[in-house]
Amino acid sequence: MLAYTDYLVGQGGRVPDKVMEALKAFLSDEEILELTYITALYDMHAVMSRALRLEFDDRDDPIVEVAAPEDFRMTDFLGSRGR
């Protein structure tokens, strides 16, 4: 599920087929719709708060994105469910 939400937010909704297949093994279509809606809603609120300078801490983002190792593949993360 986290891979799905990462693609929703980080890749603008472009979710690979293997991630979607893995998600469908755990959630119904209705549950996927709800997860998508809630994730997109939270992302929209974060973008708006940042753009309007409404963040509570009003400072640079303390979280630094760490790149995956060069040999990392999403199938490594999905394990046997990603096949």
Image: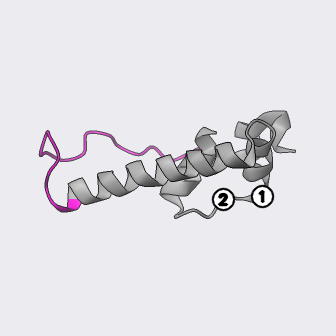
Residue 71 in view, yes or no? no
- Most extreme residue toward the front is 30
Quarter of the picture holding the N terminus: top right
In the structure shown, which secondary structural element does the residue marked by tag 2 occupy? Answer: loop
The secondary structure that dominates the magenta segment is: loop
Q: Is residue 78 visible?
A: yes
**What x and y, as percent, mark residue 22?**
78, 43
Q: Quadrant of the C terminus?
A: top right
Q: Position of residue 68 (x, y in %)?
A: 56, 45
Q: Position of residue 12 (x, y in %)?
A: 52, 64
The amino acid marked with disc number 2 is Val
What are the residue bounds of the magenta stretch?
51-71
Q: Is residue 48 left or right of residue 28?
A: left
* Left or right for 25, reference 56: right
- Residue 16 on the magenta segment: no
Dot 1 amino acid type? Asp
Is 61 one of the magenta-colored residues?
yes
Per the image, label 1 sits on a secondary structure element best described as helix
User: Any mark on residue 17, and which?
Assistant: 1
Residue at 13% x, 45% y is: 59
Q: Residue at x 74, y 52 (%)?
A: 20
Quadrant of res 64: top left
Q: Residue at x 66, y 59 (%)?
A: 15
Disc 2 crowd rating (10 Å Cα; few below 14, some 14-19, many 20+) is some
Residue in the picture at 62% in, 44% down: 3
**Front one among 25 and 3:** 25
- Is the residue marked by circle 1 packed among few (<14), some (14-19), or many (20+) residues within 10 Å? few
Are dots 1 and 2 in contact, CB under 8 Å?
no
Marks 1/2: CA–CA distance: 6 Å
- Write down the residue under mark 2: 15
Query: Residue 39 vs residue 53: left or right?
Result: right
